[in-house]
Image: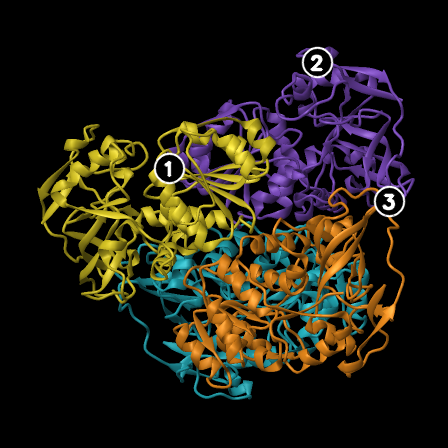
Chain colours: A cyan, B orange, C purple, D yellow
């Protein structure tokens, strides 16, 4: 079968991956599941992986097929698999977990001590078929198409995960800020809107993104190229700051907002990355705010997100590309030319 | 009466405060309480205030009497005061709150929108008498002496507040780390021990501090001058990291431990300050850990700490000094020559 | 001024209260607030008070002016009042609290150890003027009229309080059940809808109430006179039961549903009352469900509800009556002839 | 092998179970684990099962080997088992779970939709060998003997589970009440003591049980045959009631305490069963207390309890019996003649 694979780290997105002919994966263990991939979302993290930005954090056996946002149809199952059967449409949580370590026991599947991460530490789904396991697939409800939901496998649950942490501290009347209304941010904003009665301010450099935010329930819009973010939020929140800030950018300039825009006791969630946090410890003491790390959501959270999608609470903007166009997609994303989420259809 | 007052910011601790003769405070409003100060703890923050380190964070009308860790006896009360009467021994929460803003309504008294902070934004208790209010005093149970408990008014509740946040995520078998077993750290360690069944590792450069920690329930001790903190904790936690880290130092070198010693989903609590956080956003994403700011605990938390003291769960090491020795105390602390907590007895 | 007062307990609603001429309340203490009442909601609890059903639970000095759902305009303030001034429109939390007991410190104002409850333990607002305090009034945002919001002072926050407890355990896809879509239930349903992405089933004997529920976001409707509640919910929840049940009726027949309709680990919230719980302890063990008591919400929760109202998330059905019609209102409610909430306009 | 099996429900404990000769269980599936049973605790629930008290709640295929508190040594494992190997000492969580239903994904393993419960719905461990699975065994730390820890598999985690729920609402100075210091209660009391700084009152009809409680950290002791429980607790809690009540008895007479001894907002935990709850809904509204159901703790909680045992925080009183003495044990328990926990050694 055909698969888009990374052979060596590079900054040249135009030649990041090569389309290789590889063996089609087969059922080997009793809980294996083989999925015919119908949709595979392209993520900013794929660019970061190609650049080698994850090499110091996780083991990456190269060459490796990228792709961690997959959905498709089950075409093979191990002898012990009960959850799905051949022909079932599924979305694939990117993390394959063991189910028996303590984090798995606690439901904190993202911290599995024996995990494999599709397209990050093991072959992913920019390919015709994906090898995964019963513990990592979720059957889709009637009416939800794999190709439409694929990006939720990572972009979606990451945004949902952060939003869910945020809403536990958002009372009606409290303020939330969404920094960056892109692939993840536009999902996070809709999750906040569906699951809380907070007032939401969207911050983005692109007016088109702010328009999108406006349609998704944002109460206030700020374009940092036209207005001072700190002053605007000071006015919006009556000088008190926002209880929860979801930073989908994670650049130096956005993490720096924290002491000025976060309410006492509030959280600045780091979801996007690329930049750094530079902050005196005293600032965190004085304002009692936190920088809260956020990784991909858990399996159970992906179930919850599928429910939100089924209930039409979360809309996803996608554009489709062939597997052969994959490096072009990487380049376009680098130049911020992708509208919504790019989905590869292997 | 005599009061130790700051007239201008200086790095010279030997002449930081001057002993002035000022008017004794009197009851003016219906909820006023006047306390004859019997004990007033000296805090590292007092050194920081003298150095001007808080000038950019809060308004400071100079000259100002310092001192935010006070306990003593009530000598005057406004007409509406029911909680205490003349002669009652009390500990004074350092923050005078309004009781009617939303944070006060929520019990989050530290975020009061109309607060005054003893010795930081208004006259404090390095003086014979302190002007405070009914909302900021807690009657002491029988058997607890003001002079013995005074440092709990800030050192104590700050440590307790952080420990309380930490224990909500500490299951039996989880690991907690206390960095810095000084004035605050030795209280925080005892609070962790009394309120959780976590395994505790104490980290300090002074062997005497580690010995103290050993007696207070620490399961493991690390002296960074003799052993590699990261490697030791890796061994102690079986490579999983500590669920909760309480950083009572807050230096660059201690905040840098976070990505290496904090378990997935864990927290690095910033309590001590002076240094900075410098961390790539990606580190927080990869390990899903947080830098959690901590300020002084709330009024209700000071009540809880007084209960711990009453139950003999928290011991306090103090040494006593006259008001006239106050600049010497500041110097000694700067040189780390104070054992336990210095208490001024005005 | 005129006030509707209870002189002795009776089951005859037609002569429950008498319209007396009493002294207009005046400012006496420094935090007193006098409100000219514009709207005063009539509550099922008023009927219960008249019947003497609260006599064994709280002290009731008779004669007493009833009325605990009040809103109006400030006409007098004590010397220390900062929160409001003459002419300000306000909603009155029914509980007057001390602000200095431990529950008040924790923000749990409903457990105030020195409280007075309007119309239950002290004179309430079925009168031209109400004597209350700064701690019990909330200024209304522009555009919100006292007469329209009055019932939220009790019906509203009680429903909101229970809904808020429920949503902390409601993930997207989970099921919630609202039993009784009357004065409180229709508010609770809207709160659930605004603050969660749960699927909501409304249960009521009146089809008109179910139609109302349908418009407010209920996903499923059950009329117990036409369908078996247990069987219907079994089908709706795929045999798993509802995570959260809000019982605004509290009759024997509704509390009996609990073991059959509540999911493992779920809660059956008791908000309405009148009936009993009769259940083997083993049922609670086997299903690990809880019967959760609910009282009026806290002051801070009324602030949050006012925010929901301001954001048009919660609609209130009311009909207006003169003070002289008050016993007729009581009778009508007894016969279930009141549509929405009756508001007295003294 | 020999196994103690229930053939039909009876109230005659002297002939409840018969010692049958049955086939020794073997490894069949890839995740199967066979344990040679060294200790099997006898539980009040075993008496209830024999009496048929669980027949209406769960399916019970008779004849069935009872026994749900097992520990021993692994003697066989399926091909996919990684967690344990032959020769490993283990404690057996009584519930065999699927690992793929939503409750399992959430870590709420007690709500597994495809579970089997040792000795309740499938053959248990009053036998030489037990058939269980990788998902239900926990390796024992060095120094912990199977025979000593066996009763923790049910008595222990049930008590731990309730205590853990309770401590999340217990601040220092708050009051907890333990009703019934028997097989479960004496563990629950120790868990409360190890994991909180609450003040604990023990209630039991046997003075020997109260003496035990005294040694395990109870601050107050009440024998209902000698003192009025309500009046005593009123004095102990200064009229405020206990924040958390753990009712290990669950009789009519103990659930009736709730409205009088539970603090506003508090919980009366139902752990023991046999009696009923009879309470007006109004009582739960007025006091805003809850009746909280409690079932066996989760797998992860048993891990935590094993940690407590390893740290010497929880002591267990046991007496040992041969398999042939099993009906005598049932009779003795019925007559309350068992001191601590009876452990069968097959």
Mark closer to the observer (3, 2): 3
Q: Are marks 3 and 2 on the same chain?
A: yes
Dot 2 and dot 1 residues touching (CB under 8 Å): no
Q: Give percent across and percent down for residue D94.
A: 28, 49
Which residue is tagged 1?
D272
- Using the rendered view, name the quadrant where residue B116 is placed: bottom right
Q: Give percent across and percent down for residue C224.
A: 51, 25
Q: Give percent across and percent down for residue D176.
A: 49, 43
In the image, residue D212 above or below residue A67:
above
Chain to which the residue tagged by mark 1 belongs: D
Between discs 3 and 2, the one toward the N terminus = 2
Chain to which the residue tagged by mark 2 belongs: C
Q: Quadrant of the N terminus of chain B?
A: bottom right
In the image, residue D51 above or below residue B74:
above
Real-space Cα distance between discs 1 and 3?
52 Å
- Residue occupying image coordinates x 32% and y 46%: D155
- Residue occupying image coordinates x 84% and y 68%: B64
Which residue is tagged 2?
C13
- Residue occupying image coordinates x 41% and y 74%: B236
Query: Please, what secondary structure does the residue beneath circle 3 have?
Result: loop
Real-space Cα distance between discs 2 and 1?
44 Å
Query: Please, what secondary structure does the residue beneath circle 2 have?
Result: helix
Dot 3 and dot 2 residues touching (CB under 8 Å): no
- Front residue (pair B92, A53): B92
Which residue is tagged 3?
C81
Q: Is B152 left, or right, of B101 in this rendering?
A: left
In the image, residue C55 above or below residue B238:
above
- Using the rendered view, name the quadrant where residue A106 is placed: bottom left
Q: Is A294 left, or right, of C112 in this rendering?
A: left
Q: Would residue C57 be visible to someone looking at this image?
A: yes
């Amino acid at each position: 079968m055909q698969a888009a694979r990374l052979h060596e780290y590079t900054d040249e997105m135009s030649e990041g991956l090569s389309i290789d002919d590889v063996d089609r994966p087969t059922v080997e263990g009793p809980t294996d599941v083989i999925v015919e991939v119908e949709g595979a979302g392209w993520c900013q993290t794929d660019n970061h992986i190609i650049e080698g930005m994850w090499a110091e954090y996780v083991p990456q056996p190269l060459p490796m097929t990228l792709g961690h946002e997959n959905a498709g149809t089950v075409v093979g199952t191990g002898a012990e698999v009960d959850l799905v059967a051949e022909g079932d449409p599924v979305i694939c949580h990117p993390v394959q977990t063991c189910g028996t370590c303590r984090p798995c026991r606690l439901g904190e599947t993202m911290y599995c001590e024996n995990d494999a991460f599709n397209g990050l530490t093991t072959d992913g789904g920019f390919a015709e078929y994906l090898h995964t396991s019963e513990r990592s697939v979720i059957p889709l409800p009637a009416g939800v198409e794999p190709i439409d939901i694929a990006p939720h496998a990572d972009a979606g649950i990451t945004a949902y995960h952060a939003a869910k942490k945020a809403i536990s501290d958002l009372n009606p009347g409290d303020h939330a800020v969404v920094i960056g209304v892109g692939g993840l941010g536009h999902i996070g904003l809709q999750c906040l809107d569906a699951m809380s009665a907070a007032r939401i301010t969207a911050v983005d450099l692109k007016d088109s993104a702010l328009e999108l935010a406006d349609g998704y329930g944002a109460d206030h819009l700020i374009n940092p190229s036209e207005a001072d973010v700190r002053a605007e939020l000071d006015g919006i929140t009556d000088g008190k700051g926002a209880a929860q800030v979801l930073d989908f950018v994670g650049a130096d300039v956005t993490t720096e907002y924290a002491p000025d825009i976060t309410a006492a006791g509030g959280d600045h969630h780091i979801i996007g990355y690329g930049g750094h946090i530079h902050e005196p410890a005293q600032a965190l003491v004085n304002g009692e705010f936190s920088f809260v790390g956020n990784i991909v959501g858990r399996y159970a959270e992906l179930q919850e997100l599928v429910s939100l999608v089924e209930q039409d609470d979360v809309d996803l903007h996608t554009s489709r590309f062939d597997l052969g166009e994959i490096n072009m997609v990487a380049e376009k994303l680098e130049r911020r030319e992708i509208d919504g989420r790019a989905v590869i259809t292997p």
